Image: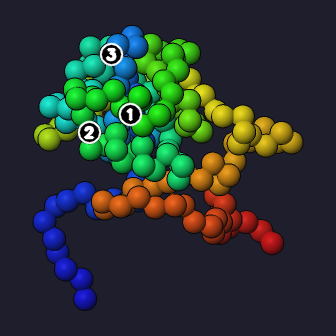
Amino acid sequence: MKQNWKPGTMIYPLPAIMVSCGATPDEYNVFTASWVGTICSDPAMCYVSIRPERHSYGIIKRNMEFTLNLTTEELARATDWCGVRSGRDYNKFTEMGITPVKGVKVSSPYVEESPISIECRVKEIVPLGTHDMFIAEVLNVIADDRYIDPATGAFDMQAAHLMAYCHGQYFKLGDAIGRFGWSVKKK
């Protein structure tokens, strides 16, 4: 038997992302978001949805740039802390011992400890209700070479120990159960 519930956000799991922003070191901030995702592959585009009352909202709206930093088991505490504390009250980089590095293609910093950082330029802001969606073009991806297979040049997501967010909790990612197209591959 199934139940009908009121409309809600039950699309889980989601990435737990640290979003960094700011054009200068005195403005740098980092916050945690899970309302984030891919929306197009060519051109590469993504989005992050942010509540207008959040400290970083104004920083991103003013600079029209941000960086998405994938998080790992090692970054779990910092990821959670940066999601519940405000940049109005704390320098989150200092408090959590994470390193802001000046962006390559954008002015916003990336998190040095992140295995993948995705530099983005905002193309459009869509007001949706509690959150505004910042639709952005991906300008650059910064990959930690510790996770790049020297033989193939591929990024080993499994070795990075990425984490996910699911309905108020953080989780390690589990074992692979298949590759794209495995269900129709000829034997």
Q: Position of residue 105 (x, y in %)?
A: 53, 14
Amino acid identity at mark 2? Arg
* Quadrant hosting residue 11: bottom left
Q: Which residue is mark 1?
A: 95
Amino acid identity at mark 1? Glu
Q: Position of residue 186 (x, y in %)?
A: 77, 68
Q: Earlier in the sequence, mark 3 or mark 2?
A: 3
Q: Is residue 167 visible?
A: yes
Q: Is residue 147 left or right of residue 42?
A: right
Q: Secondary structure at mark 1?
A: helix
| Residue nearer the viewer, 138 or 106 | 106
| Residue nearer the viewer, 50 or 161 | 161
Badge 3 vs badge 2, beta-carbon distance below 8 Å: no
| Residue nearer the viewer, 185 or 27 | 27
Q: Earlier in the sequence, mark 1 or mark 2?
A: 2
Vertical arrangement, residue 153 with respect to residue 173, above or below: above
Q: Which residue is mark 2?
A: 85
Vertical arrangement, residue 132 with respect to residue 13, above or below: above
Q: Secondary structure at mark 2?
A: loop
Vertical arrangement, residue 165 with respect to residue 175, above or below: above
The span from disc 1 to disc 2 (Cα, nearest Å) is 10 Å
- Residue at 17% across / 30% down in the picture? 52
Amino acid identity at mark 3? Glu
Q: Position of residue 28 (x, y in %)?
A: 37, 20
Q: Give neighbour class at mark 2: few <14, some 14-19, many 20+ (Cα, 10 Å).
A: some
The span from disc 3 to disc 2 (Cα, nearest Å) is 16 Å
